[in-house]
Image (cartoon, rainbow, N blue to C red):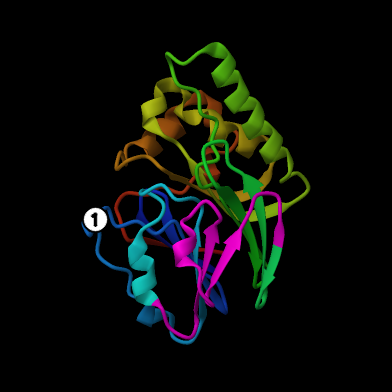
């Protein structure tokens, strides 16, 4: 059983049997209620920060410091945050921390994406690794973004992913679907939760009505509000 809480934007808390993984925690300046980590009892808690952009790195994570909390930060985050409970990570590396293992991919925006194995579950959080295709940008730039994305996703081949978190940014207009469509067609993923949709909860309905999602739409989990909880077998 995996217990997932959608926090906001690209922020999720993933609770497994013994651990809690909190990715890209973001409260938009306190607009979103703080996460109650007391409910996680004596589980080990890990805050993951994919990169330094303000909508992925909320300094309030350090308010949660205690003996069972650690912070895994992409190394583009300011080094002033380094301390005994902080692990800085770089792209294309592997890390073993306590009883979890972490692999990183290279984001084509900034920082990393995370593949985390713990309690016999594999979780993928894309960060800002996305198929960025902006209408109005030069064709060569858009092509490069797509190629980097596909090359990084290729590093997931052969893995079974229980839950994935993938951007569906509506600012990309009709191209919002490129990243999730590609990864779901090429990687073994049980369930996917859309993210980075800037409060546009209608993106789920748009996704499942898009003919491109026909082969995987039953794997898309609908998010309808912040702090929503999902139990995933």
Would residue 166 be counted in the magenta stretch? no
Which residue is pictured at 41% across the width and 51% down the height?
A: 56
Q: Quadrant of the N terminus?
A: bottom right
- Relative to 1, is 18 above or below? below
Which residue is pictured at 58% across the width and 41% down the height?
A: 107
- Can you name the residue that lies furthest to the front here? 80
Can residue 220 be seen? Answer: yes
**157 with respect to 87 (left or right):** right
Within 10 Å of disc 1 (Cα), the crowding (few <14, some 14-19, many 20+) is: few
**62 with respect to 17 (left or right):** left
- Relative to 20, is 126 above or below? above
Q: Position of residue 25 (x, y in %)?
A: 39, 59
> Residue under circle 1?
29
Is 229 or 103 nearer to us in this picture?
103
Q: Quadrant of the C terminus?
A: bottom right
Give the extent of the magenta segment. 65-94
Is 219 or 26 nearer to us in this picture?
26
- Can you name the residue that lies furthest to the right here? 158
Q: Quadrant of residue 88?
A: bottom right
Q: Position of residue 177 (x, y in %)?
A: 49, 30
């Amino acid at each position: 059983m995996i217990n997932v809480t959608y926090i906001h934007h690209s922020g999720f808390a993933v609770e497994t049997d013994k651990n809690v993984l909190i990715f890209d925690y973001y409260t938009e300046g306190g607009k979103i209620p703080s996460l109650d980590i007391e409910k996680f009892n004596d589980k080990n808690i890990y805050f993951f920060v994919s990169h330094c952009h303000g909508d992925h790195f909320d300094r309030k994570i350090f308010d949660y410091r205690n003996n069972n909390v650690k912070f895994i930060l992409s190394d583009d985050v300011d080094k002033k945050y380094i301390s005994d409970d902080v692990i800085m990570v770089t792209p294309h590396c592997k890390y073993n921390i306590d009883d979890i293992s972490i692999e990183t991919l290279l984001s084509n925006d900034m920082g990393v994406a995370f593949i985390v194995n713990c309690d016999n579950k594999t979780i993928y959080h894309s960060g800002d690794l996305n198929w960025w295709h902006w209408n109005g940008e030069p064709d060569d730039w858009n092509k490069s973004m797509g190629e980097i994305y596909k090359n990084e996703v290729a590093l997931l081949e052969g893995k079974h992913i229980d839950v994935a978190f993938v951007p569906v940014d509506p600012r990309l207009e009709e191209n919002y679907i490129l990243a999730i469509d590609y990864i779901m067609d090429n990687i073994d993923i049980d369930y996917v939760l859309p993210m980075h949709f800037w409060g546009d909860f209608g993106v789920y309905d748009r996704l499942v009505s898009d003919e491109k999602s026909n082969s995987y739409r039953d794997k898309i989990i609908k998010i309808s509000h912040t702090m929503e909880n999902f139990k995933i077998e």
